[in-house]
Amino acid sequence: MSPGPGATLAYPIVQRTLANGLRVVASPDHGTPTVAVNLWYDVGSRDEQPGRTGFAHLFEHLMFQGSAHVPSGQHIGLLQAAGASVNATTWFDRTNYFETLPTGGLDLALWLEADRLGSLLDTMTQESLDNQREVVKEEKRQRYDNVPYGDVMDRLIRLTFPTDHPYGHTTIGSMDDLNAATLEDVQNFFRAHYLPSNAVLSIVGDVEPEQAFERAEAYFGHLRSAQKPPKTTPVPLPPLAGTERDETAADVPAEAVYLTWRLPARGTRAFDAVDLAFSVLGQGQTSRLHKQLVRGQEIAESSGASALGLIGGTSYGFVYGRARDGIAVEQIEAALVAEVDRLLTAPPTEQELRRAQAQFERHWLHELARVDSRADAFGEYATLHRNPALVNTRIAELNSLTVDDVTEAVGTLFRSDQRATLIYRQEHA
């Protein structure tokens, strides 16, 4: 059953802050004998300094290289032996580490997370730095350099943000910067950002809140206290001028066009409204782009649109189309622009808006049904918006937006003359 357009969810959320500043979020769920442990650190690529890019992502790897009481490479092995799934990710606004395992493994998970937070520097060596630096380079080759459209995010970011903006580079960073990084540089980055006061620990699943807090205190309470690093929020950027363009020839299966926009920061009603417009335009087979370019005119083999919410003043979003054989890329660009312009002359209908809201609701409920995704969502909203309870009101928040709200957002934020353009042409031997 759907919760309904104005309903809120009721996941239990209990919070406590330890003396050293670590925020702990507990949420019991005794449906299965499992527990999810999730640590969000308020550090991402936007916190990197010029000439020192890629450090946030580098630590996603270094944090698995051993600590005072855990030999190199054993962190994952110990958790997997206890039946855990474990991973970590880095983004512009955060780095997170997470594991889900049988309830009996909770102490192990918390001990491992606390040990590397408290003692990674004690065991970090030039050898471990060099090793993980090479791992990152190989990741870049496999995921960015040697796959079709692998550099699309890098190119879109460079078109959308000034080079010196906190969001002006991707999370993978510059390989030149990583090569130039000294052990001291990397240690200083850890000291500045890997602090209890700069983290949120979520414990979700088969454990009562008081038990979760007692364990958090036992394993993390003794770690050094230090002031959370100051954050500066950049002034929101003005819209793009519509003249920014980039073109590349590459070994891609289809010629393609990407259009990108600057959008409001996430957490604002304006971002949510334009996000729904992106959904109407290009998400799913009922979207306007799919119906017009893929099924109607049959000029594109695929199309889509996506808004990526960021908290540092300015987000961004893009639409794209990949041409069918024999179709000029200029025709795809013109068709994309026409559909964006049509949002102004033919605003989203009530039916289109409700469909976009229903898509979000379905995705949100699907994610929250799992304790690991729920723990991640609590960490996300506690870190980025200071309030994990927003997870429970998110559906109602999106469903409160009206056609007029979306139409106004389109008229001011999502015009075709506020875009930058990226074109991929096929490389011919």
Image: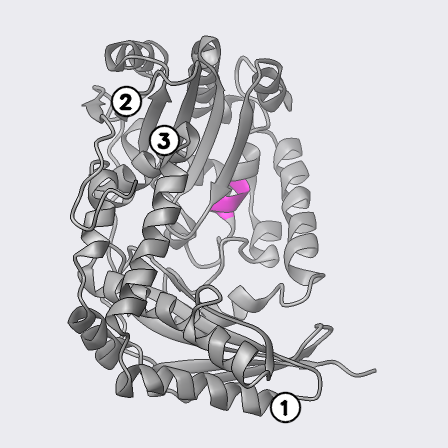
Residue 8 position within the rendered picture, expressed as x and y whole percent measured from the top left:
19, 40
Residue 177 position within the rendered picture, expressed as x and y whole percent measured from the top left:
56, 55
Crowd band around label 3 with a 10 angstrom C-alpha radius: few (<14), some (14–19), many (20+) = many
Report the front residue among 359 and 220.
359
Which residue is at a point 47% across and 17% down the rendered structure image?
109
Q: Mark 2 points at which residue?
A: 26
Above-or-below relation of 162 to 117: below
Can residue 244 be seen at all in this image of the molecule? no
Ranked by sequence position, the earlier of labels 2 and 1 is 2
Ranked by sequence position, the earlier of labels 1 and 3 is 1
Identify the disc placed on residue 166: none
Q: Name the residue under label 3.
A: 375
> Which range of residues does the magenta coloring cover?
55-59
Question: Which-is-in-front pick, marks 2 and 1?
Answer: 1
> Magenta residues: mostly which secondary structure?
helix
Q: Mark 1 points at which residue?
A: 328
Ranked by sequence position, the earlier of labels 2 and 3 is 2
Q: Label 1, secondary structure: give it.
A: loop
